[in-house]
């Protein structure tokens, strides 16, 4: 079995970080998705995946494929893990097109940098592995098989008849390896079928992690999904690779089919292998799966935050700020984020996505944003939101600057709580310090910059006949923030 050193010297980790994780609403939202959710130890899944990738890569780079919306926050999280974050490349998607196009662009970049024989190990950013040592061992087997020309996936020993995962049926064992040929990929089954899979011992959960050479994957894509391969190559040719982060051209990428790696390649190729492991894998796709990470009391209740339970059983309660009291209820998920409350039967946890669908259909901000919203320059928290007035607490990081912009239908009023700032109001520049107040009339160009060495804290009051997020005209923005965002 290949050891850690063999893996580290051979593999180029690729992290896929996208998707909203809508079944974990209201904590996971489009602007702050599942990879950024904190677990019991206070670390996010994105940080945990990056740490795992660093173990695999030794001193080599780790590539992350994500969107511009998530780039700055992801980079900040990574910097807390590896201060040399600039050595790790990012590949930014202009929109989500599922996993096959994302992996294709990563493979083309790795091939250009490392050659066709470079071995990629692809991992989603929002999966949890409790036994990373076992996974590192499995990765060693996968790397060895990838070097032999296999397209390798990772199977997980099922612990119960799960209906929310796809399955892999293993075939015969491979020579000089603990891996197997893949006999079939199977869609999410019903409960009776899943029970049969569990009893047979031949089926394993499909983990969504992969290992192959960059050239081998591109060849398979050309054969089985030529339209994806062609579009990816066109995007790669048009991409400015002279600077970081690498950005995929939007117009060409929009024409790429939206398809998963399973449908595009893995289910069609005849050189697929599976390495099976028991490394405590979970994609934490629902609140029921999240609840299983927590210890429970004698009545089966799991509590994270402030809660009181009376004559209640098998409940999961998470409250970030307010006290939640549950009396005489069973088998519930209760999640309170301050601006939204979820109450659901644990057995219906998969259906939470329907809530997000309804919110999205009604253009409700709760489908996208939390009360606290992270931005490249810092963050803001909504303290009050009424039809004619919104109050926000804003934090601007040292050296960061907000967009030069104006609002046509609302005025803004700033009160500096701490730190030092420079404000631009039309053509004037004004220095601000703690205790200073400044009013910006509607129709006035304005910009704010933190000129100090510590975080700038201020309270902003927006007043007007309309204070929607689309009441904004941007003139300059160093972050390239989309027009619809504040």
Image (cartoon, helix red, strand yellow):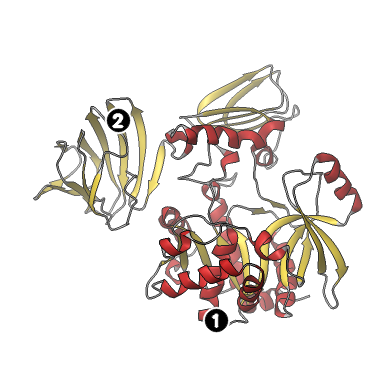
Which residue is pictured at 86% across the width and 65% down the height? 171
Is 122 above or below relative to 357? Answer: below
Checking the image for residue 390, the label placed there is 2
| 107 lies left or right of 414 | right
Is 147 above or below relative to 347? Answer: below
| Mark 1 surroundings: few (<14), some (14-19) or many (≥20) residues within 10 A | some
**Residue 15 visible, this angle:** yes
Residue closest to the eye, 41 or 480 = 480
Residue closest to the eye, 322 or 273 = 273
Which residue is pictured at 44% across the width and 75% down the height? 237
Q: Quadrant of residue 130?
A: bottom right
Checking the image for residue 114, the label placed there is 1
Q: Quadrant of residue 3?
A: bottom right
Residue closest to the eye, 240 or 431 = 240
Q: Residue furthest left?
A: 428
Is 83 above or below relative to 464? Answer: below
| 330 lies left or right of 50 | right
| 19 lies left or right of 178 | left
Residue 161 percent coordinates (x, y): 81, 44
Which residue is pictured at 34% across the width and 51% down the height? 482
**Cα distance between the residues tagged 1 and 2:** 51 Å
Task: Give the secondary structure at mark 1.
Answer: helix
Task: Give the secondary structure at mark 2.
Answer: strand
Q: Quadrant of residue 140?
A: bottom right
Residue 7 percent coordinates (x, y): 67, 75
Count of marks, rendered view: 2
Checking the image for residue 306, the label placed there is none
């Amino acid at each position: 079995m290949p050891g850690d050193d063999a893996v580290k010297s051979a593999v180029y980790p690729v992290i896929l970080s996208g998707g909203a994780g809508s079944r974990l609403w209201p904590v996971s939202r489009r602007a702050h998705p599942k990879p950024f959710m904190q677990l019991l130890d206070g670390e996010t899944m994105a940080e945990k995946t990056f740490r795992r990738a660093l173990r695999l890569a030794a001193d080599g780079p780790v590539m992350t494929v994500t969107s511009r919306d998530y780039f700055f926050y992801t980079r900040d999280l990574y910097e807390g893990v590896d201060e040399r974050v600039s050595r790790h490349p990012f590949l930014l998607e202009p929109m989500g097109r599922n996993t096959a196009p994302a992996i294709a662009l990563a493979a083309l970049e790795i091939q250009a940098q490392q050659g066709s024989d470079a071995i990629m190990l692809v991992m989603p950013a929002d999966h949890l592995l409790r036994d990373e040592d076992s996974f590192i061992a499995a990765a060693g087997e996968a790397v060895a098989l990838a070097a032999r020309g296999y397209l390798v996936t990772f199977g997980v020993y099922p612990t119960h008849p799960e209906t929310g995962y796809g399955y892999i049926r293993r075939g015969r064992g491979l020579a000089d390896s603990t891996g197997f040929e893949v006999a079939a990929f199977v869609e999410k089954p019903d409960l009776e079928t899943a029970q049969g899979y569990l009893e047979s011992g031949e089926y394993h959960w499909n983990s969504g992690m992969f290992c192959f050479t960059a050239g081998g994957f591109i060849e398979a894509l050309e054969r089985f999904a030529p339209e994806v391969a062609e579009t990816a190559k066109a995007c790669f040719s048009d991409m400015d690779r002279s600077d970081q982060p690498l950005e995929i051209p939007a117009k060409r990428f929009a024409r790429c089919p939206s398809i998963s790696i399973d449908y595009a390649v893995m289910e069609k190729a005849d050189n697929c292998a599976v390495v099976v492991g028991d490394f405590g894998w979970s994609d934490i796709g629902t609140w029921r799966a999240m609840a299983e990470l927590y210890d429970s009391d004698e009545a089966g209740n799991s509590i994270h935050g402030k809660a009181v339970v009376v004559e209640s059983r098998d409940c999961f309660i998470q409250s970030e700020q307010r006290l939640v009291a549950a009396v005489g209820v069973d088998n519930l998920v209760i999640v309170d984020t301050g601006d939204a409350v979820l109450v659901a039967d644990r057995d219906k946890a998969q259906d939470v996505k329907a809530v997000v669908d309804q919110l999205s259909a009604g253009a409700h901000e709760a489908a996208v944003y939390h009360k606290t919203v992270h931005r490249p320059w810092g963050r803001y928290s909504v303290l009050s939101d009424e039809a004619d007035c919104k109050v926000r607490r804003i934090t601007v990081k040292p050296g960061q600057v907000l967009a030069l912009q104006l609002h046509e239908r609302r005025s803004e009023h700033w009160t500096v709580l701490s730190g030092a700032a420079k404000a631009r109001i039309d053509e004037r520049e004004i220095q601000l310090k703690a205790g200073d107040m400044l009013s910006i009339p509607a129709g006035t160009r304005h910009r704010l910059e933190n000129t100090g060495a510590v975080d700038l804290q201020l309270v902003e009051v927006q007043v007007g006949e309309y204070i929607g997020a689309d009441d904004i005209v941007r003139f300059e923005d160093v972050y390239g923030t989309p027009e619809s965002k504040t």
